[in-house]
Amino acid sequence: MPEDSMDKPSIVTCTAPVNIAVIKYWGKRDEDLILPINSSLSVTLHQDQLKTTTTVAISRSFQEDRLWLNGKEEDITHQRLQSCLREIRRLTRKRRTDGDARSTDSVGLSHKVHICSVNNFPTAAGLASSAAGFACLVYTLAQAFGVEGELSGIARQGSGSACRSMYGGFVQWIMGSKDDGKDSVAQQVEPESHWPELRILVLVASSERKPIGSTSGMQTSVQTSLLLQHRAEAIVPRRMVDMIEAVRRKDFPAFAELTMKDSNQFHATCLDTHPPIFYLNSVSQQIIHLVHRYNKYCGETRVAYSFDAGPNAVIFILQQFVPEFVQLVQHFFPPDRNGEDFIKGLPVKCAALPMELKQNIGLEPVPKGINYIISTKAGPGPRVVDDPSQHLLSAEGLPKKTV
Ligand code: DP6
């Protein structure tokens, strides 16, 4: 490369998805390496609705590593960020020593990086952004340094659930057994094209308070909950096998039952934690009742729910039943705004609600209990953005605009 162009940063932009676990990860056996006490399985959500975009610029003229998140400069010395940066640089060095042609280019290992990252969904919505964020960081850094291959083990060191966002479709995080964590990685079970009829609805609940974070929550659970120990040892191994089987066969009732049971068991371990942790609120409980009563009325399992470390419900449902179920949600949680604004993402057709169905559900409506619905489906893993106009950093390596 000519001397004068060496000062120009090399810039790469990528996007990465959010994932929702249907077999939950809760509890670490190693806090530093982020090694879990059980395996888990998730569905990667489509990036058309929810994604993180990250730009990495590398230049020998940068004085220090810097990071901007959603328009604000943040402290890059954060331990988990440093782990990811260190591991990517270690991998780059290793590939170069091993003589990998792709990584012997001009990007200097001693050069500093500028990182800029934004989410296309409001952080205030309470959706876990750390999985998409760390997956995107690791994927983009790897592209910038020219390293390929297994990267989920590095994303895992940013945030456990981030390792599953490194793949699209249905993804398992195999807990592994080695002390160094080398075998604790994510693996695709089926691609996003496998089950096209499956739809996912994120019901964003209105909530004022910020619940306790997953990192400290699971720490207390590991220390105090015998139920969590029992779950990890005796329940999850069998459930992983059954869930993989249900996904492979596209057996919705089996998938739905396991999803709901696992979400409920996770929240039971939170209640068994001392002092207890409550992530579900009264709206979450109403949604749980609604789903079970709807399934009962239909005489088959058509809908499943799953809740993470917050009150938002994630609904799994086959495409053909979406209009009626959304109508039902709108009936029992009458929104503040008009119907169009209430549903974001994939369009949902209108449906009539039989009077008998409404009466059968028999719940008291909760006005404004749900803020809005994001309608989506399973989607692909991280992607490189080819269009340079999409870079979040300028040719000087500074954020183009505040977001
Ligand atoms: C309830 O991955 O956010 O969403 O590894 O400490 O960063 P750290 O925790 P995190 O935990 C996610 C917990 C969960 C379940 C799941 O995604 O499996």
Image (cartoon, rainbow, N blue to C red):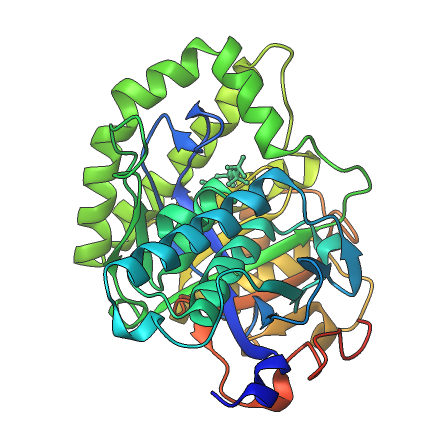
Which sits in the foreground, 360 or 160? 160
Q: At 38% from the left edge and 15% from the top edge, which residue is drawn? A: 229
Which sits in the foreground, 87 or 155? 87
Q: Is residue 227 above or below residue 136?
A: above
In the picture, the quarter occupied by the C terminus is bottom right
Residue 132 on image: x %, y %: 53, 57
Q: Is residue 219 above or below residue 342?
A: above
Residue 242 on image: x %, y %: 20, 40
Q: Is residue 6 above or below residue 154?
A: below
Q: At 50% from the left edge and 82% from the top edge, which residue is drawn? A: 385
Q: Is residue 246 visible?
A: yes
Residue 271 on image: x %, y %: 57, 18
Question: Which of the 4 image quadrants contains residue 179?
Answer: top left
Residue 133 on image: x %, y %: 57, 56
Q: How many marks?
A: 0
Q: Is residue 293 visible?
A: no
Which sits in the foreground, 65 or 217? 65
Left or right of residue 223, residue 226 in this image: left
Q: Is residue 285 above or below residue 342?
A: above
Left or right of residue 264, residue 310 in this image: right
Extreme residue toward the front, this view: 3
Q: At 72% from the left edge and 80% from the top edge, which residue is drawn? A: 396
Which sits in the foreground, 387 or 221? 387
